Amino acid sequence: MIKKADFLHFLHGQDFANGLRISFGTIIPALVGFYFGDLGTGIAISLGALYASIADTPGPAAHRRNALLATLLLVFLMTLLTQFVNGHPILLVLELMVFCFLFSMLAAYGPRAAAVGTTAMLIIFLNIEPPDGGHNIIEYSAFITLGSGWYALLSLSLTQVMPYRLAQQELAETVREVATFIQIKSEFYDPTSDINNSYKKLIDQQIKINTHLHSLREILFKSKLIVKDPTPIGRTLILVFSDIIDLFEKAMSTQFNYDEIRGKFGDTEALKEIRFTLIRLSNELHNFGYFLAANSRPKMLFNLQSDLENLKEVIDNTTTNEDENTFFLKKVLINIRSISRRTQTLYTYFQSKEVDTQRNIGDISKFVSHDTIDLKIFRNNLTLKSDIFRHAIRTSVVMVVAFVLAYLSNFGQHINWILLTILVILKPGWSLTRERNFQRLVGTIVGGGVGIILLIWVKDPTARFFMLLVFMVLTYSIIRINYILGVIFMTPYLLIMFSFLGEGTVDVARERIFATFIGCGLAFISSYIILPSWEGEQIQKYMKKLLIANYNYFIKIPETLVNSELTETDYKLARKEVYVASANMASAYQRMITEPKSKQKNSKSLNKFIVVNHLFTSHTANLIDAVRSTDHSDISGRPVRNLKRTAVKMENLIGLFEDDRKDPFIPAEINLPENLLTDQVNTQEKTFLISQTRELRRITDDLRRSSDIVLGILPEHETAPAEEIKELVADHPPIIKN
């Protein structure tokens, strides 16, 4: 059931804004053409606007402008070329073969270039049929290009009028995803919840958060307007972004043996109060995200300070004895206080006109990738080792096969529907193709049924036009975030549109469903037999990148000891790489376990590898925080020697994987002074650090064992993934600072 708050957030969000912009941009030319008695010209211009909208993905204004200009050029050239070769099947086959390959290869330059390539292929497919409206080839190409220019002007103008809106909306989505992460964490303190299921949801949520963080970095840090903006709003957006990452780190960094905790404190009020407080914090962040998306001054829902005082009182009443294990509850209290403090800080940015301009958030230029259009990148991907190259060949072959089959079988007027279905379904990986295949089939069948029923019941043209607008906005608002629901809305939208053009509803629906089945079948079969890409064959690449990211994050601990100070930029950059690599590894694993059983390799050990890496990251974050706030004389001796051994173990482990000649792993060179290797004092702080560093060594041993199994050095054991999670957390209990 959709909550009222979620619905209102959707109305203020980026996706609905995109839906309104695309719908407005594509419907206006058709309405103008209809008003002046030239509907054919209006539809041609509207189609051009639709082309441009596909390449208009979220990001910095300059990058969007470049993508739209490239699309504008391709719209004219591909429309002109395809219209010239129409009626000549051999030439059409050659065009499909060459350009489907070239435009698929644009994915080598990133998602935005891939979107431009997809648009170019869409232009080819939709122009295979002769143009309507009595236009000649040049006129039709000009009108299509005019439509793309109209949409580009509309989109970029809206950005100029509201330059911060996209960043606000994406930031609001990120805040709400982090709030959901905290809500999932609260489940661990509910004795009735399934711990294994909660861990799975945590990893899934981490993937979502990383996706939003990547998009947000692109929007914020690649926009000169925001980065160099001296006004409060630009600075505020960057500060909120920095704080929400710190808050996310606090939420994910601490891991405990939750089975033991439930057994010890399950009947007390402490766990209930912890869970209650975390849920309130989650709701508070959801509330902040809502106001941020609505471009309103946020107002707090709860008195968080009062909640913390109540929690402290409950914990004090629970931990009256001197059992050191009860210090877990106090550790949780400290963590929740930190999250609460950062949550309250987010609200303070909007309560005052003055923004902290002195706070150091690091060199933000290092937190984004810098994509370049270099021919060398294209050449480097012309190999069967490249998934992009394999996908480009697969796309080219299956499009030619589909066209030839449809042409020889005289498939109605809409041959391009089969090609369009393949285009949106066929993905580089088999698992993604399989998922999109199912979504497309179900969405088309359900949407077709809904569309036919509505057209039978509703005869009034005005009512039909209103339904067309509603389905249009919903389609373009939802299809990027929920494909199956987007297709369900898109099918009635298309059927209603064709009804205005005088085509039979049932015939169009039947042909569309039939084309969908053919396209889905061809896409699915081709992904299995034409140079298939299996995640199991790529998984070691993700494993190595995650190990290197965790190593570089961990190595900041001894670097801090030697250099006395860990710069904010270096620390946050290493943390970012761990988050990205963790999400990529988890995504690859999820895709792999949906592939055929025969293609799944060492799934149990890979599951263990992901969990152990999560533990490694958590313990590293705790140690970095401890080292940055502790006198270095407390760290000397055994803690430092444990750190050194852990570094060596990680270096040896990474060395087991195949070396990447383009980006080889280079171990850090840190010369620890003799005084740090020798025990100087024995303090309670040092006892804590000894335990923490020893735990990291044990976790590294577990990483080695799971990696050995994946690499074939050891046979895989029989423990089930769900049981492994319990075992791992039990093997690595929390180290509570007394």
Image (cartoon, rainbow, N blue to C red):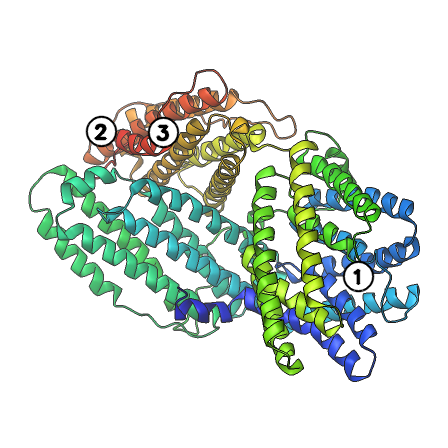
Residue sitting at x 22%, y 53%: 274
Of residues 575 and 254, the one nearer the viewer is 254
Residue sitting at x 67%, y 66%: 494
Q: Residue 108: where, in percent of width, then height? A: 70, 42
Residue 163 appears in view: no
Q: Residue 558: where, in percent of width, then height? A: 40, 32
How much space separates mark 3 and mark 2, taking CA atoms? 45 Å
What residue sits right under mark 2 in the picture? Answer: 681
Position of 269 with respect to 661 (left or right) is: left
Could you tell which of marks 1 and 3 lies nearer the N-terminus? 1
Q: To which quarter of the image does residue 106 belong?
A: top right
Residue 412 appears in view: yes
Residue sitting at x 35%, y 58%: 342
What residue sits right under mark 3 in the picture? Answer: 720
How much space separates mark 1 and mark 3, taking CA atoms? 53 Å
575 in relation to 722, above or below: below
Quarter of the image that includes the N terminus: bottom left
681 in relation to 591, above or below: above
